[in-house]
Amino acid sequence: MEPQTLQEHLRMANKVDGARRKIYIMLLEDPFPDEEALSAILAYLAAFFRLPVKVVHSPWELMGLTTRPGRSGFGDVQLSMDDVLNWLKRNVPRDAYGIAVVTTIDLFVPGPGRSEYIPGRSHYTQRHGACSLARLCSEVDWKVEPCSRGRFLRRCLKLTSHEVAHMFGLKHCVYTCRMAGTTSLEHHDATTLRFCGRCEGKLQHLLKWSASDLCDRATGLADVLANCSPGAEFDDEVTALRRRPDMPICEPCMAVTSKLQRGPRKPS
């Protein structure tokens, strides 16, 4: 599949205007089980897209969602991604550029032959999406095998920025930037935290960022990453952002190996 061009993106994406300039993050749990991760996500999204981020709550138990028992040890219940998105489609706030669910509850797509779970899905033009952090805390996505706190937070920032960017009309990228379409945690980990120059350019044109805006954005991102960094998890990104604040820090890479595209095999 050919990568989405800048012209294709600008024709498809919803315009950003004064009436719709907020990114809404909807939580299905109250209180949210991981306040530290949530704070990092909210700060990162605000700095990344340079738009206000507003949190709203809707208890999942009251939304009429299809559920099924949890799988592979990742919680007691799974929620239907289709039902979550249908609910969001009917409830997009009038001042929202888009609204995305962020939850620690595992999500699935109903139907025969579907995968065991789905980490995220968003609509390019209808202003809604959803993502689950449920399996990001594990080394692998088919059994519970806890990973480091830093890796978990990195995955949270990657997944949420990816799904929100879909709401801004960005399609999957052929590079290993964060807009690559990943099918496993192994591939997810192989992508960069930030976007490649092609995807950065789409956001810059859509959101009309000036050179000064780009510098302020990089400074804001560096500050967020430095503040949420456990140990030295984000040191390389912080250093690069502060060294060249006017440039994207991830270089395009055409070589996504077939191994990563397939993802890890489950044991027989």
Image: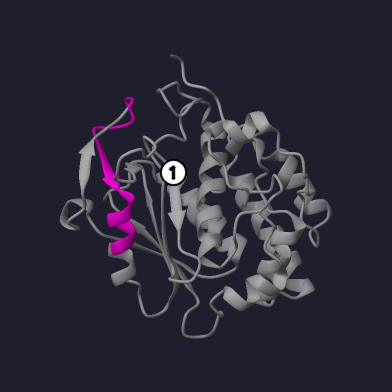
Question: Of 2 and 21, which appears nearest the observer?
Answer: 2
Instruction: Indicate left or right for 144 with 264 as reference.
Output: left
Question: Relative to the observer, which residue lies in front, 163 or 47?
Answer: 163
Rendered location of residue 77, percent (x, y): 24, 37
Instruction: Please identify the residue farthest to the top as the structure is shown.
Output: 268
Looking at the rendered image, the quarter that the N terminus falls into is bottom right
The residue positioned 21% from the left and 44% from the top of the image is 67
First to last magenta residue range: 72-86
Decide which of 134, 242 is in the foreground and name it. Answer: 134
- Label 1 belongs to which residue? 119
Disc 1 is placed on an element classified as loop
Above or below residue 165? Residue 71 is above
Residue 122's quadrant in the figure?
Answer: bottom left
Q: Residue furthest bottom?
A: 18
**Quarter of the image where one finds residue 79:** top left
| Whole-percent x, y for residue 251 in the image | 79, 48
Residue 54's spot in the image, x, y percent?
41, 66
Number of numbered labels in the structure image: 1
In percent of width and height, residue 39 lies at 46, 51
**The C terminus: image quadrant:** top left
Q: Is residue 222 above or below residue 186?
A: below
Q: State yes or no: residue 81 in magenta.
A: yes
Find out whether residue 152 is within the magenta segment.
no
Question: Residue at the spot x=23%, y=52% of the render?
Answer: 60
